[in-house]
Amino acid sequence: MPVATETTEAPAVAALPPAPAFSVSKGIEQITFRRAGFANAIEGTTSGMLSLNAYVALKAMGGEAAGYEAELSTLVTMLPSVAMLFASAYNGGGTVRRRRRYFVFAGVFGRLVFLLVPLLVLLPGALTPFAFVMLVGFSSLICAGVPPALNQLWGANYIPASRGKRFALLSSISMLMVMVSAWVAGRFLDAAPLFEGVQNYQLMYPAAALTGAIALFAFYSIRMRYAAAIEAAEVRGTRPLKRLVRAYGRAFRLLRRDRNFLQYEVGFFLYGIAFMMLLPAVPVLFSRTLHADYSDFSQATVVTVQCSLMLVVPVVAWLAKGRRVTVVTACAFLALICYPAALGLTALTHTLAFAYAAFALFGIAMSGVHFVWNLGPVSFARGGNPLPYTSTHTSLVGARALFGFPLGYVLMKIFPGTLLPIFGGAIGMLLIAAGIIIHLDRRMRRQGLNQTA
């Protein structure tokens, strides 16, 4: 990912010839929006079905019966986040602009791989869920470049004046389809098998494979537009591993140079550890403590959260506009404490209603986190190039996944009879994270800095 110091580095090989100068027209924006609307709807449908991965591994594939709840839940929820460590390897413009075929590559190898799920029943007993985990991990690794590729698509094909509005509309389409798809998938998995001897999950995953591939093929159909200046620094033949090493080297230099941003990311790192240590505990809570069916799991963990996000995000954006980003971030972290607290109450009372309440509170709090996640790093650029800050912020997702998920797993193994240490630990982490951000806010005010969201 390019930063301010990028131009001082000698390219490995000759630069690509510059693309012709180009300006985005309304017609290009409209074509992009129409095709992206269809692609986002199909992508949301796929995401809704895949949101049940952990619960399918535990319930349908025998992970719970085999006694591997903690291992499977941790791996299925952890691998997609760890794969983000490699997102920077896909982020070079030569990969996702000039070589638009990446979307086809990801559609074939990252999504159609789920066509193999029905064949997993041929494996011996306990191997089935772990083979499924391998498929999830492989898919996550191949598709790690999709988010940066889409970010570059929105940046290339929309003018700044309309980018935010169109992105918000596309996000709403995607969230709506995630909700609908997750709800339908939960009901489908709870229903009697459509065909004798074939479990319904063996039908759902081939459907998810096809819709996922169609979505990425639809994104491929959108021709990316870019100006010559964007491509000037791109080099031909740079290996993904070399791009990855360079990206993390730039991120380290930026954090060392901007101490305020470093402290902001430390706070976010602790928030991320708290968030990630909770993720593997949730399927175990629903399976072991609540004995919930697929419908309740999907409705609580997906539908309730998405509804809360859709309703509260605009309110948060209105309340946060013009306020110091550090204050908004600290408030979001403090509000998120309600989520593990409500999960702890659920574990103590074995009451499903408290689980629904927990995820409603989670959606409300995450509306604030979502806001500062996207706009917080940008505010530290202070009128300069925001890309180094946003790329560093994104790259650290995978780094903290290496801490948060294993911590949750270790606590589940140390305290096999209760999940309360995980919920209590998450509350402590969020309190510390909020304290770090509050300290940063005071220091920046003394420095005369007032970064607003």
Image (cartoon, rainbow, N blue to C red):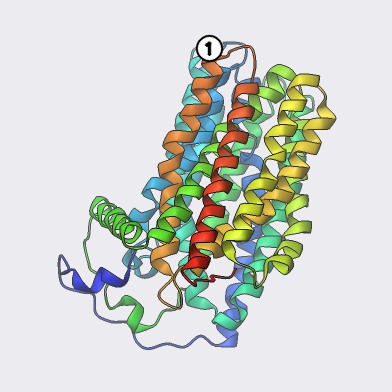
Q: Quadrant of residue 255?
A: bottom left
Q: Is residue 204 left or right of residue 160?
A: right
Q: Nearer the viewer, residue 420 or 104?
A: 420
* Residue 221 rendering spot, x and y as whole percentages: 51, 67
Q: Is disc 1 placed on a helix, strand or loop?
A: loop
Q: Is residue 219 above or below residue 46?
A: below
What quarter of the picture does the N terminus occupy? Answer: bottom left
The quadrant holding residue 148 is: bottom left
**Which amino acid type is shown beneath numbered disc 1?**
Gly
Residue at 72 percent of width and 39 percent of height: 338
Q: Position of residue 431 (x, y in %)?
A: 60, 41
Above-or-below relation of 265 to 338? below
Residue sitting farthest toward the front: 446
Between 91 and 440, which is closer to the camera in this rendering?
440
Q: Residue at x 35, y 78 (%)?
A: 230
Q: Please state if 275 lies on the left or on the right of 200 as rendered.
A: left
Front residue of this view, candidates 407 and 27: 407
Q: Is residue 392 visible?
A: yes
Which residue was labeled with disc 1?
125
Locate residue 109 relative to residue 301 in the image: left or right. left
In the image, taking residue 322 as reference, residue 385 lies left or right, namely left
Residue under the image location 62 percent in, 35 percent down? 427
Q: Does residue 218 show up?
A: no
Relative to 212, say whether 338 is above or below: above
* Mark 1 crowdedness (10 Å alpha carbons): few <14, some 14-19, many ≥20: few
On the image, the x and y values in percent for residue 264 come to 48, 55
Measuring from the top left, give residue 326's x and y in whole percent.
57, 60
Q: Residue at x 66, y 61 (%)?
A: 171
